[in-house]
Image (cartoon, grey):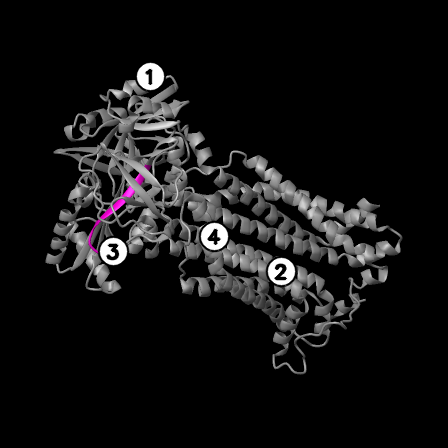
């Protein structure tokens, strides 16, 4: 009997059952895709490194270095690979379409395919085994800001010789930074490489990159490896700081989507079960007990949940790929257990649906057959009064009815408003994050405290990078050059070198930043104060933990042949080197002669002393680019975007969220409105019986959703800044050592465009579905009990 009842029920209420099935599919799709994204992000770098076969230690060494063989013969070394490399110092050595390339800041590293140290992946995520003669692959840094595409020819100029190569496409290298300011890497055929290696200027800067698998990296100290820069597998994860920042933001979006889906599903199940009260009353009148009635609906919803979950499970994979595509341009973020996670998510959805159904049918045991026939209502309302009164209201009939519907069923419309608010927040938080990550105020988190223009041209800063003691003289010469062109400036230069620091656990490497020039300001410290003397240093929180020190402690740093002692005076926030950095006092002098194991620089900072407006600053920057014959002169906003590479990525996510918001909003409105029409069929018939036309009823139904969307937009607008600040600080604290970030906002986009997208989508969706009221006739009032 129960199976016959179930079969007839599924056939009789096709529309509502299809609506519920679609919601189950949507919920499973979002839940499975979100869980896959969470798994991919949290294990992202580790999984990527495993796929790329990244070893325990990576180091650069000349082939004739006596320590090379000593290192490779260490007892703990299990295996190694040696990549041959050549260095092209500037992008201007390459030409494309007859013009010098000036699109990347640091040198280009040429790699021979004779022996590749790790697995490199092409655009299809296939491992590159070899490269055809006369061709090359390159990281995206090489092609940024150009229209180079596969099949195009690029020319390399070395002295008086030229070499032509065909570009095959971009590749991903797990140990290669792809930030805009990073070095460009090219993989080329070994015969082409050997030909280039005969050029003296390139051969002078050749070295091998050793990829070593070993049990005890600490053994490298026994062969004097302190003079050889090397990185462990853990160190290399810092390359993906900003990529993981975007990935964690996407993780938050995934969680919001999952919550949205479950809230809507809970509402829909509760709503559809209330539609069953009439049938429930009949069954109770026939003597069927409460448990059997609840069991019947549990079986019905379990069948629908299984079908919907399986369909949603299948659709979750393309959705997950689309969501992660925008944040996985530089690395491969892929969960190793996609199917398992998807199945678990689908199972969770099924269990949650059954729990929702179980609790929603709980009212059955408290109902009599008469209550059930009245849909659980008696038509009376003694304890609460409506806010609106027909006699006092100045609203037109349609507006009054719409507002009265919303105020008479607040729980129903508040849930919809919450879902709509989450949809808007997905857009607005992406907008605020994108704007924040190109805001000049972010420069302070990159150890830049001054300047309206920033020079990152290698030819202009190279001399100061390798002779920081002479920086003041070079900066004065640069100021004089700009003065002759009518620009009054104060210039400064910031650089950081990698030095060993003594700790109780042995020597540890840390970057120590210093600045020279005019117009400099001390960094902002969240605790203590910025260093003012030569024997003072400020550290990030991560650096303090890394070294095992606190404010007031002393540290010893090996700088060349000297050991210099510093007292820790303060704590500051920084994105540099994933938060592992210290800063010295302004004008600090490093030793005159020391071996550079690693360096990082923020370039030349230019402060215009004549207080120019934005247009004049833009003109000055164009003029400086012409003076230097380089495009690598940036405004403060461009500098932040160049150093993080995040803003454009987040804008891509934001655009995807806008499309997703429209789709989700329209889908929710269509399904909800169809449910409302089914539930309110008798009321609509009665309205038609008293002379209200179809258009007025359609307007009433549409205005209800527009009112809800406006309320949701207001809620989202109030919540966007606290939510954005909390999300940005939480993400920054997870992947770096930056706190106290206050997000910037594009007021027009956040408070006008995004809310309008929601309101328009809700309005259009409700109008489209409200046309179904035309199918209801005045004679349908006969269904009213």
Circle 4 residues within 10 Å: few <14, some 14–19, many ≥20: some
Relative to 196, say whether 76 is above or below: above
Callout in the foreground (4, 1):
1
On the image, which quarter does residue 452 sit in? bottom left
Comes first in the chain, label 4 or label 1:
1
- 557, 719: nearer the viewer: 557
Q: CA distance from mark 2 to mark 1?
A: 67 Å
Circle 3 residues within 10 Å: few <14, some 14–19, many ≥20: many
Comes first in the chain, label 4 or label 3:
3
Circle 1 residues within 10 Å: few <14, some 14–19, many ≥20: few
Q: Tell me residue 213's x, y (percent).
A: 39, 23
Numbered range of the magenta stretch: 510-521
Comes first in the chain, label 3 or label 1:
1
Q: Tell me residue 253's x, y (percent).
A: 50, 50
Residue displayed at 61% across by 39% down: 344
Q: CA distance from mark 2 to mark 3?
A: 49 Å
Callout in the foreground (2, 3):
3
Disc 1 target residue? 73
Q: Tell me residue 487's x, y (percent).
A: 15, 59
**Numbered tag placed on residue 415 in the rendering:** 2
SS label for mark 2: helix
The secondary structure that dominates the magenta segment is strand
Q: CA distance from mark 3 to mark 1?
A: 50 Å
Q: Tell me residue 670's x, y (percent).
A: 60, 59
- 625, 609: nearer the viewer: 609
Q: Is residue 463 magenta?
A: no
* In the image: residue 468, left or right of residue 484: right
Residue displayed at 79% across by 47% down: 296
Disc 3 target residue? 451
Comes first in the chain, label 2 or label 4:
2
SS label for mark 1: loop
Comes first in the chain, label 2 or label 1:
1
């Amino acid at each position: 009997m129960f199976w016959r009842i179930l079969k007839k029920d599924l056939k009789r209420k096709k529309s509502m059952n299809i609506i519920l099935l679609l919601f189950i599919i949507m919920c499973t799709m979002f839940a499975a895709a979100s869980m896959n994204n969470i798994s991919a992000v949290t294990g992202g770098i580790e999984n990527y490194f495993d796929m790329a076969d990244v070893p325990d230690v990576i180091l650069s060494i000349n082939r004739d270095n006596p320590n090379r063989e000593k290192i490779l013969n260490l007892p703990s070394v299990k295996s190694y690979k040696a990549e041959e490399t050549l260095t092209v110092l500037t992008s201007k050595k390459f030409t494309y379409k007859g013009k010098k390339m000036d699109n990347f800041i640091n040198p280009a590293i040429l790699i021979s395919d004779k022996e590749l140290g790790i697995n490199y992946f092409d655009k299809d995520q296939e491992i590159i085994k070899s490269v055809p003669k006369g061709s090359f692959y390159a990281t995206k840094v090489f092609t940024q800001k150009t229209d180079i595409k596969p099949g195009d020819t690029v020319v390399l100029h070395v002295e008086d010789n030229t070499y032509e190569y065909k570009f095959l496409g971009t590749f991903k290298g797990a140990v290669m930074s792809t930030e805009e300011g990073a070095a460009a890497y090219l993989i080329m055929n070994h015969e082409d490489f050997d030909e280039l290696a005969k050029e003296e200027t390139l051969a002078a800067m050749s070295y091998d990159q050793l990829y070593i698998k070993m049990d005890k990296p600490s053994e490298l100290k026994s062969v004097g490896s302190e003079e050889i820069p090397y990185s462990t597998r853990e160190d290399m994860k810092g390359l993906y700081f900003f990529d993981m920042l975007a990935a964690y933001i996407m993780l938050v979006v995934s969680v919001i989507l999952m919550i949205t889906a479950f809230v809507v599903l809970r509402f829909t199940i509760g709503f559809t079960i209330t539609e069953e009260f009439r049938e429930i009353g009949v069954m109770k009148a026939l003597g069927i007990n409460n448990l059997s009635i609840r069991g019947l609906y549990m079986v019905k919803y379990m069948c629908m949940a299984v079908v919907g979950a399986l369909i949603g499970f299948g659709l979750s994979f393309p959705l997950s790929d689309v969501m992660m595509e925008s944040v996985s341009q530089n690395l491969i973020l892929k969960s190793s257990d996609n199917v398992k996670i998807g199945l678990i998510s689908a199972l969770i959805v099924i269990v949650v649906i059954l729990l929702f159904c179980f609790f929603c049918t709980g009212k059955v045991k408290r109902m009599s057959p008469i209550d059930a026939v009245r849909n659980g209502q008696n038509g009376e309302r003694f304890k609460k009064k409506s806010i609106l009164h027909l006699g006092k209201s100045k609203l037109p009939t349609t507006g009054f009815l719409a507002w009265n519907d919303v105020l008479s069923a607040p729980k129903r419309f508040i849930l919809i408003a919450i879902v709509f608010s989450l949809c808007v927040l997905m857009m607005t938080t992406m907008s605020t994050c994108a704007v924040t990550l190109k805001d000049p105020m972010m420069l302070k988190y990159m150890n830049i405290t001054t300047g309206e223009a920033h020079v990152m041209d290698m030819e202009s800063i190279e001399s100061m990078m390798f002779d920081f003691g002479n920086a003041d003289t070079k900066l004065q010469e640069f100021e004089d050059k700009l003065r002759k062109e009518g620009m009054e400036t104060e210039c400064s230069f910031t650089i950081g070198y990698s030095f060993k620091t003594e700790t109780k656990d042995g020597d540890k490497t840390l970057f120590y930043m210093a600045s020279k020039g005019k117009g400099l300001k001390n960094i902002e410290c969240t605790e203590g104060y910025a260093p003012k003397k030569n024997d003072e240093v400020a550290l990030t929180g991560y650096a303090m933990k890394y070294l095992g020190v606190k404010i007031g402690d002393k540290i010893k740093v090996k700088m060349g042949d000297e050991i210099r002692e510093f007292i820790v005076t303060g704590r500051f926030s920084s994105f540099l080197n994933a938060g592992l950095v210290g800063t010295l006092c302004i004008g600090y002098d490093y030793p005159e002669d020391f071996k550079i194991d690693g360096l990082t620089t923020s370039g030349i900072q230019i402060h215009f002393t004549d207080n120019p407006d934005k247009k004049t600053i833009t003109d000055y920057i164009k003029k400086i680019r012409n003076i230097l014959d380089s495009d690598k002169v940036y405004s403060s906003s461009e500098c932040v975007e160049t150093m993080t590479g995040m803003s454009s990525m987040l804008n891509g996510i934001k655009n995807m969220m806008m499309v997703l918001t429209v789709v989700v909003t329209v889908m929710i409105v269509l399904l909800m409105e169809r449910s409302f029409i089914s539930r309110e069929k008798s009321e609509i018939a009665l309205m038609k019986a008293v002379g209200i036309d179809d258009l007025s009823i359609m307007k009433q139904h549409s205005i209800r959703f527009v009112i809800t969307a406006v309320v949701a937009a207001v809620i989202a607008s109030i919540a966007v800044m606290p939510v954005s600040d909390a999300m940005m600080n939480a993400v920054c604290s997870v992947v770096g050592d930056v706190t106290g970030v206050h997000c910037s906002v594009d007021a027009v986009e956040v408070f006008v465009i995004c809310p309008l997208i929601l309101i328009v989508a809700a309005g259009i969706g409700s109008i489209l579905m409200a046309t179904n009221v035309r199918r209801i006739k005045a004679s349908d009032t006969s269904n009213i009990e």
